[in-house]
Image: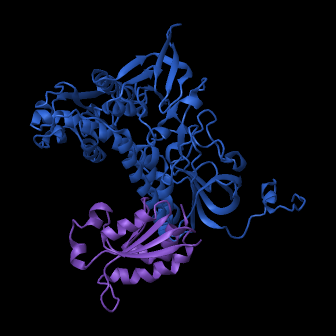
Amino acid sequence: VQAHKEEDNPQKTMEVNGLTAVPDSYDYDLIVIGGGSGGLAAAKEAAKYGKKVMVLDFVTPTPQGSSWGLGGTCVNVGCIPKKLMHQAALLGQALQDSRKFGWQFTEEVKHNWMTMTESVQNYIGSLNWGYRVALRDTKVTYENAYGEFVGPHTIKATNKKGIEKLYTAERFIIATGERPRYLGIPGDREYCISSDDLFSLPYCPGKTLVVGASYVALECAGFLAGLGLDVTVMVRSILLRGFDQDMANKIGEYMKEHGVNFIREFVPIKVEQVEEGTPGILKVTAKSTTGDQIIEGEYNTVLLAIGRDPCTRKIGLDKVGVNINEKTGKIPVNDEEQTNVPHIYAIGDILQGKLELTPVAIQAGRLLVRRLYAGATTKCDYVNVPTTVFTPLEYGACGYSEETAVEKFGEENIEVYHSHFWPLEWTVPSRDNNKCYAKIICNIQDNERVIGFHVLGPNAGEVTQGFAAAIKCGLTKEQLDNTIGIHPVCAEV
Amino acid sequence: MGWEEMQVRGYPEFVRAAQSYHGRPIFALFCGDKDADGRSWCPDCVTAEPVVRKELHNLPDESVFIYCLVGDRAYWKDPNNEFRRNLKLTGVPTLLKYGTPQKLVEEECFKAELVRMLFTED
């Protein structure tokens, strides 16, 4: 038995090696760090089983000063505002198409950024409020404070006024999510914005350079162009890394043909301010990735969308011994979302090797809590999760990309069925007749089971959802062939 | 200076009241009309009003509490009445913080905790 000095500060005692003074009872059964999709779902579920739960949520403002309310990335600076602005752009297109269907209006139609942004932010505000009501109603304690571990069962919560409070809990769920990455070049934090700023930007972004080739980059570039802005995308190498490249290239082609400029194989090395203003004028200097060529360009706004980094480096994980991948910041967990420290769990975008999607985080959070407190055994199924990219031509997918299928099963063992299609709604306004596309990838050795589904066309998300359920049931090509189509819809292809 | 209450009836009066207090935090409780005996045709409003009144002392300084009678039951049921159309009210009672998306509707108004949260938190 190792004797140690009694310290005045009881917290200190807990940090000393050897015999730590563990309190008889904790303040909470569960503390959730992060009030996003995963965190809130887990907290509300735990409250259902009568557990005493606390949620800590805090948004560190962006370099430009943007911040937001409870709900996490999806609600505030992700899926929700993104889809609404995508819709705004689609409506612009619909207005153009409508003339061919007989609608007559003489004025040229213009877009007002402020009107759209205010409506979107209002809706988000109602969601923030709704979450607060839901938490209060289910007796979950919510604090708008930055949580970090200071001891195995203790969290320090610091609010925006700098006031610190300590809380203890039996178990913890880390659901801190991610934030946009910056380039690390001169002028990036001072002058560039990220998706964290875009959806609440209090002025129209104007002529925009989007740096990146992620779905965030392409979706934002897509709707900005759809709203009538001059948009350029600067891509270091390939589009949509990790997605089926055949589909990614088709998306890029479509965007190029519809007014989005692409600068391929360049990276910015410097951003300077030419003129102040809202927006001002920025000068971007970029270098080729394949040679020494340097180019310059001027834009009103530079939007960085080069990736997102987990918020795991400054929450005291080292103090409690939770392993993280030092390079990426992601947290490895077992198939029960447990970290290497048994009473600490993690869910959502911060997980290593798992999909960064809201419904995945929600499902993982709910199932985890049911296993902890309701005796359930079901684990989260990360296979065959459907997803959709809301670029101007939407892309829905479920299962393997063609490349991954070939890699895993061998080219001779898979069969790809594909088809271009022309949505009926596009015929009258003479829109492209060879851009929409669907393909399924089948495993020949397993009854031609459908292992990959990809569709490029309007309402791709709506189309994909049903197919995801079918794939989960083990859909085969024969069953698909035997399913009579609905006419006239895109999905019948 | 603490908070003050103003009572109004009908949409135009409400709008005038809200405009006259522009610049101060405004909280409003919308209820169905009351008869000669002071009872509202809306049973939920009868339940909610005392709960809300008990929390009024939590209102921030300088704020205004507008107690608004919307009209009779027939007026309220009309899907095109001005409260539904312009203020986007969906039910009575509704307790809201004017100019923000923060509101409590129907049974939510019965819960003192939620009323207090609306009055005191950002």
Above or below, A319 relative to A393: below
The residue depicted at 51 percent of the width and 16 percent of the height is A286
Which scheme is used to colour this image of the protein? by chain
The quarter of the image holding the N terminus of chain A is bottom right
Could you tell whether A18 is left or right of A154 in the image?
A: right
Going 53% across and 16% down the picture, which residue do you hit? A285
In the picture, the quarter occupied by the C terminus of chain A is top left
The location of residue B7, given as percent across then percent down, is 40, 77
Q: Is residue A264 above or below residue A216?
A: above
Q: Where in the figure is residue A103, as x and y percent of width and height?
A: 12, 38
**Front in this rendered view, residue A225 or A414:** A225
| Residue nearer the viewer, B116 or A217 | B116
A346 relative position to A445: left or right: right
Chain letter, blue in picture: A
Which quadrant of the view contains residue A229? top left
Which chain's colour is purple? Answer: B
